[in-house]
Image (tube, helix red, strand yellow):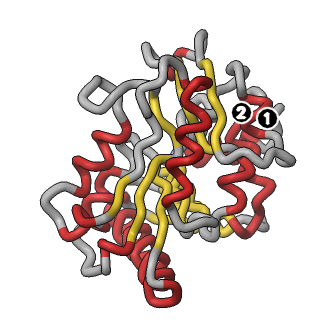
Amino acid sequence: MPDIDLRLFKSKAALIEAATDHLANILAEALNGRGRASAMLSGGSSPKPIYEALAKMPLAWNGVGLSLVDERWVPSGAAGSNADFIQDCFADTPAQTAFFVPLYNGHATPEAGLDAAEQALTLMAQPFDLCVLGMGMDGHTASWFPRSAGLDASLDPSSTATLAAIDATGCAVAGDHTDRITLTFSAVSASRNIILLLPSVEKLAVFKDAAKKDVRDAPVKALHALQNRLTVFALEGSQ
């Protein structure tokens, strides 16, 4: 991966500190330059300590718009809601004044709610200043699950859509929530700063190995095409 900005750390604590500072600097630069900033965030355990540290940073948070890289098609208050997860990370901190845009909107299916979700994201400063991604051990990132229905449309580099619907039925990692909405590859790649968090040696190995696979089997491979526009924070050695 010679063209990717790969940053390796010996401990999770060092990775969390460096990633937090990096994200804070991106938002501060956007706020200083344009008076507003936008961040698309992923759910999951990997970014949680980073978000909690970021939320304490002394930024002009009332100028920051937050939304989601992807979402399970469930309302706030239901198990699995990424919207609830993100807002919990930022609650009772300086960041609670940020403007949050959910992707779930009450329509029966992600397909039915796509247009409304796209319209909601027009409230966010675009192109997005920051897109934070994670990765599962099956090689998925965002809600780009291997061989899932909607994956080809999500990864189409010529797509002009910001969002796509995914049916992850049959994908074990998706669990009980198989109806998803996700940023497209086009929307991710249009972001000013794209971050991938790989806080384990095993995840770094999966990401590297994806380069040799069909993108439909390891969708995170799509990110390799971003080359040095992608910054990877990864763990090496013992934790």
> Looking at the image, how many numbered discs can be counted on the residues?
2
Query: Is residue 233 placed above or below 18 in the rendered structure?
Result: above
Identity, as a three-letter code, of the amino acid under mark 1: Val
Identity, as a three-letter code, of the amino acid under mark 2: Ala
Query: Is residue 227 placed above or below 177 in the rendered structure?
Result: below
Residue 74 position by quadrant: top left
Q: In this view, does 81 lie to the left or right of 123?
A: left
Q: What element carries label 1?
A: loop
Q: What percent of the width, then of the height, locates residue 21?
A: 39, 76
Q: What percent of the width, then of the height, locates residue 33?
A: 52, 89
Q: What percent of the width, then of the height, locates residue 198?
A: 51, 51
In space, the residues marked 2 and 1 are separated at their CA atoms by 5 Å
Label 2: few (<14), some (14–19) or many (≥20) C-alpha neighbours in 10 Å:
many
Q: CB under 8 Å between callouts 2 and 1?
A: yes
Q: In this view, does 239 lie to the left or right of 42?
A: left
The residue located at (51%, 56%) in the rendering is 132
Q: What element carries label 2?
A: loop
Q: What percent of the width, then of the height, locates residue 223?
A: 72, 51
Q: Give me the disc on residue 218.
A: 2
Residue 131 position by quadrant: bottom right
The residue located at (39%, 69%) in the rendering is 64
The residue located at (72%, 47%) in the rendering is 185
**Residue where numbered disc 1 is placed:** 215
